[in-house]
Image (cartoon, helix red, strand yellow):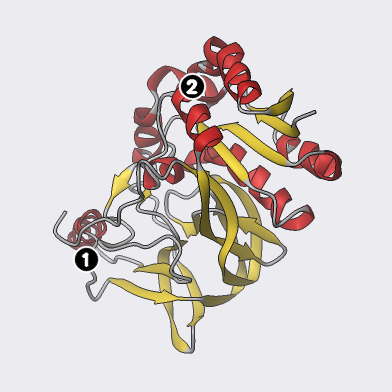
Amino acid sequence: MGKKLLFVYNPRSGRGLIKQNLAEIIDVLTKGGYDVIAHPTQAAGDARETFARMAGEVDTVVCSGGDGTMDEVVDAVMKYAPAMPVGYIPAGSTNDFANSLAISKNMVEAAEDIVVGDIYQCDVGAFNDKHFIYVAAFGMFTNVSYETDQTLKNNLGHLAYVLEAGKQLFNIPSYHIMVDADGRKVEGNYAYGMITNSRLVGGMKNITGRAVDMNDGLFEVTLVHTPTNPIEVNEIIQALLNGAETSLVEKVKAKRVTIDSAEEIAWTLDGEYGEAHTHVEIENRHKELQLFLNRRKPVKLVSPNN
């Protein structure tokens, strides 16, 4: 009898392409020596709940869907079976995490890479009592991913996020926060902040910085001051697109970040709603996510000149 593998997939992610590849994916995983238990998610939170229920019965888990599906599975793995290896077959509209690690966009090829792959020890984030794989963020645009209609995502793909974000350009929030990043303390009014372990966010390269190592034990922290006029808005946009630091966009690397505010601030974790908080503690769990990657396609750092 082979090892037991739980295959959790979101049948609605990314135009529902999983349905066209499902039989072949399961065949690849079976030929790889696994007894496959397939579970289509039924609602938000189902991937997390399914793994929590079955963690003691399986040897590994593979998920297919968008970054939100992967987020649920990783959160559950870190809580119930932190040493268990995880495979990812991306099927969402943007797939920042998968693209950052050069995981194949071809779903069957991604399954083959899991079967032949080695373990890549990836950093993972702890956020209060939850976990995230690549981004925890608050403020401007952070609700776009979870408030954009799934049908619109399926029909328009990444463009759906851009259209939803465009609605918010003239309604910029401002939060007074106190930040401690490995002892470096700042306080002020900010419109946006993100703590990331990714080479892309929102499908955009360089936004997190120009040299990102996803298992160096450090997050990239980006804090955007509240703009006071259209010129500052333009400066912020240009700085973010170029991965630059200015007087309006602060950047720092840190292992541990705490953020405090007088009012509750809504957070997003990997594109999913992360609830509202007045105090958050974010910590880099160095190399604690055991991820299948095909080493024939080595993970390359983004060059500072790219």
Please give left or right for residue 297 compared with residue 244 in the image. right
Give the residue furthest to the left.
305
Badge number at residue 244:
1
Q: Which residue occupies 58% across, 71% down? A: 283
Examine the rendered structure and indicate whether residue 97 appears above or below residue 233: above
Quadrant of the rendered image containing residue 40: top right
**Residue at which label 2 appears:** 108
Is residue 13 shown above or below 247? above
Q: Nearer the viewer, residue 226 or 105?
A: 105
x, y (%) of residue 67? 53, 40
Q: Amino acid at mark 1?
A: Ala
Amino acid type at mark 2: Val
Q: Earlier in the sequence, mark 1 or mark 2?
A: 2
In the figure, is residue 296 to the left or right of 92?
A: left
Residue 10 locus on image (x, y percent): 62, 26
Q: In screen coordinates, is 122 left or right of 44? A: left
